[in-house]
Image (cartoon, helix red, strand yellow):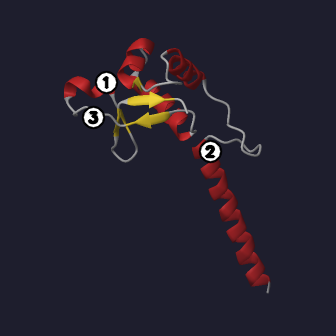
Amino acid sequence: MENRIARLEARIDQLEKEVAELKKAAGLSDDKGKKAPMSGNEEALLSACRSAGAVSKQVKIGKLREDLGWDAKDFDDALDALAKAGRILLHQGSMGLSLSNMDSMFMGDNGESFTEVSIP
């Protein structure tokens, strides 16, 4: 019986770790469904999305990159965090992939090429 209890406690610990990882990936805090606080870059990018009209339409990622003028990694990290937290939606466009338009897109975790964002 003690062995079974020990196995169940180990499983509970594992499940709690998995839940914490999922909450972190979804941008949720430990306070029942509240969104985790955003970083400064995430707030600035979300504000730029709003200013560009992403609440009512899709906005080109290339335009946001150009307007903000950030380092590519900083921009991509903030965009990825906002998308994973559900604060923005990424949209795939019909643009063909070429070296000249690489700055106009964002590559997803599974190789998708996103060209526009909107705010849900």
Spatial CA span between label 2 and label 1? 28 Å
Residues tagged 2 and 1 counted as in contact (Cβ below 8 A): no
Q: Of discs 1 and 3, which sits in the foreground?
A: 3
**In the visual, does 27 lie left or right of 12?**
left
Residues tagged 1 and 3 counted as in contact (Cβ below 8 A): no
How many C-alpha atoms fall within 10 Å of the one at disc 1: few (<14), some, or many (≥20)? some
How many C-alpha atoms fall within 10 Å of the one at disc 2: few (<14), some, or many (≥20)? some
In the displayed structure, would residue 7 be above or below residue 20?
Answer: below
Give the secondary structure at mark 2: helix
Residue at image location 63% in from the left, 29% down from the top: 38
In the displayed structure, would residue 95 be above or below residue 71?
Answer: below
The quarter of the displayed image where residue 112 is located: top left
Residue 120 lies, in percent from the top left, at 55, 33
Pick out the residue farthest to the front: 56
Pick out the residue farthest to the bottom: 1
Mark 2 highlights which residue? 24
Q: Earlier in the sequence, mark 1 or mark 3?
A: 3
**In the visual, does 92 lie left or right of 2?**
left
Which label belongs to residue 94? 3
Which label belongs to residue 79? none
Q: Earlier in the sequence, mark 3 or mark 2?
A: 2
Pick out the residue farthest to the right: 2
